[in-house]
Image (cartoon, rainbow, N blue to C red):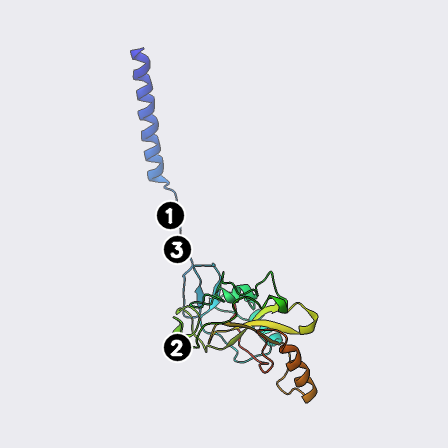
Amino acid sequence: MKRFLFVAVLVALFVGVGLILSYGQDAPPTPGPSSPVKTAKTWKDPETGLTWQVTPTGGGMKWTEAKAHCKNLSLDGHRGWRLPTISELRSLIRGCLVTQRGGPFGVRDTCLSSGCAKGPYHNCLPKSSPGLSGAYWPPDILGDADFYWSASLVSDNDFANTAWGVNFDDARVLASKVDVSGNMTDEEARAWNEVAKKAKGFDPNRHKARARCVR
């Protein structure tokens, strides 16, 4: 019995020394550095994992122009940028409990009709959030606190060719016509105003907005 225990101890010591030498010669690789959270051009939101432009480019654009602009964008050596969905765009809102991600306002990727613009609509004062100049977005990103397009279209027929977006000046979720040039005829303007009166969150006068691209 004693001899058996002695042999077992020797075997254990031999194996242990072998493992130590093995790891010393071929240690497991240490993980490389992760992608930076923020560069001069991009910022990765730690809450969602989405990467955003730090400063939006392109100026005021119609919706189709905004989609094309993001599709053709290259930042920090990366392509694959796109216009965010309305839920993704809402995830940037900071400081307005009604419309920020998880807030009670109804418009989101799973509810895109005009009837989804319900619940507490708006209670946030302009330029009163932690972003620079009071914008309702994180202080890590820059740009004018203005209306920004999402890729999400309003889903019901009364609002055909209308897309959702967010005004980051006061954190309102709004919708606007996607391709109106700004030179509406009187008849077009009257028709759009009548439709817009039927629902909250529809802006009959805004035809161009900005784009903050995401990947």
Identity of the amino acid at label 1?
Thr
Identity, as a three-letter code, of the amino acid under mark 2? Ser
- What x and y, as percent, mark residue 48? 47, 59
Instruction: Estimate how packed mark 1 is, as few (under 14), some (14 to 19) or many (20 or more) residues with alpha carbons within 10 Å.
Output: few
Give how far across and how far down residue 90 sits, in percent: 51, 66
- Residue 7 located left or right of residue 57: left
What x and y, as percent, mark residue 104?
Answer: 51, 63
On screen, residue 156 versus residue 203, left or right, reads right
Q: Nearer the viewer, mark 2 or mark 3?
A: 2
- Inter-mark Cα distance, 1 to 2: 42 Å
Q: Residue at x 33, y 13 (%)?
A: 4
Callout 3 environment at 10 Å: few (<14), some (14 to 19), or many (20+)?
Answer: few
Chain-order first, disc 2 or disc 3:
3
Residue 147 badge: none
Visible in this render: residue 80?
no
Asked whether 127 or 81 is in front, the reply is 127
What numbered label is drawn on residue 30? 1
For this rendering, which residue is in front, 5 or 43?
43
Query: Which residue position holds label 3?
Result: 33
Q: Nearer the viewer, mark 1 or mark 2?
A: 2
Q: Is residue 55 left or right of residue 196?
A: left
Report the amino acid beneath label 3.
Pro
Image quarter (top left, top right, bottom left or bottom right) of the N terminus:
top left
SS assignment at label 2: helix
Query: Which badge, 1 or 2, is on the more N-terminal residue?
Result: 1
Q: Is residue 194 visible?
A: yes
- Whether the residues at callouts 2 and 3 have beta carbons within 8 Å, the answer is no
The residues bearing labels 3 and 1 have C-alpha atoms spaced at a distance of: 9 Å
Read off the residue under disc 2. Answer: 133
- Residue at 40% across / 52% down in the picture? 32
